[in-house]
Amino acid sequence: MSNQRVSRRQFLNYTLTGVGGFMAAGMLMPMVRFAIDPVLTAEAGGDFITTGTSEEELSETPIRVDFTFEQVDAWYTSDVTQTAWVYLDEAGEIVALSPTCKHLGCTVSWEGRESDPNRFFCPCHNGLYEKSGKNVPGTPPTAPLDQFEARVGDDGILQLGQVVPNKIV
């Protein structure tokens, strides 16, 4: 035992200081974590997603390409599947169009209506798009279909990137 005795007043002072310190740390830790969290996050793996479709499968006729990627929203991770209509244009360049109609967000399909061959068709309100993604005047869509950035990887597999606005005139 120590020769120095602790008075009641000192004991309460030590106890309240300790409890107050723990409470302050409990309130400050989330704020500190929030402030330094961007520094601790891992960098993205890349902007392009491999689709599993080889370059040899592409032709002048649009084909539907489904691709899946992992999406992280805060603490929730999920696999997201998206679709693109992909074809080669006259110059042999890859064109990858988003299937989302610019009118109400329905999904368009290639040659979805017999009366309009070689066009994309939106069944929601009879919207039509040319093969290039340009909206047909006189139909509900107000803008052309968006495009995916596209490239072919070193292994010959199609890779799709971000959606960008279609610049068709």
Image (cartoon, helix red, strand yellow):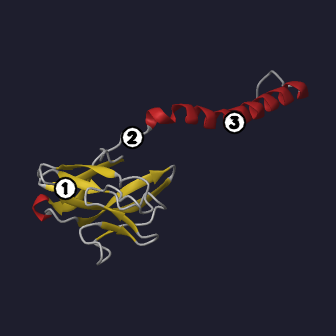
Question: Which numbered disc flags the more N-terminal residue, 3 or 1?
Answer: 3
Tag shown at residue 27: 3
User: Going by the picture, which residue comes out furthest to the right?
Assistant: 8
Coordinates of residue 99 in the picture (x, y in percent) = 35, 62
Secondary structure type for disc 1: strand
In front: 46, or 95? Answer: 95
Coordinates of residue 100 in the picture (x, y in percent) = 40, 60
Secondary structure type for disc 3: helix
Query: How many other residues sit within 10 Å of disc 3, few (<14), some (14-19) or many (≥20)?
Result: few
Q: CA distance from mark 3 to mark 1?
A: 49 Å
Mark 3 near mark 2, Cβ–Cβ under 8 Å? no
- Label 1: which residue? 158
Coordinates of residue 150 in the picture (x, y in percent) = 23, 50
Question: Which numbered disc flags the more N-terminal residue, 2 or 1?
Answer: 2
120 horizontally vs 28: left or right: left
Residue at 46%, 59% in the rendered image: 103
Q: Residue 43, located in which quarter of the rendered image?
A: top left
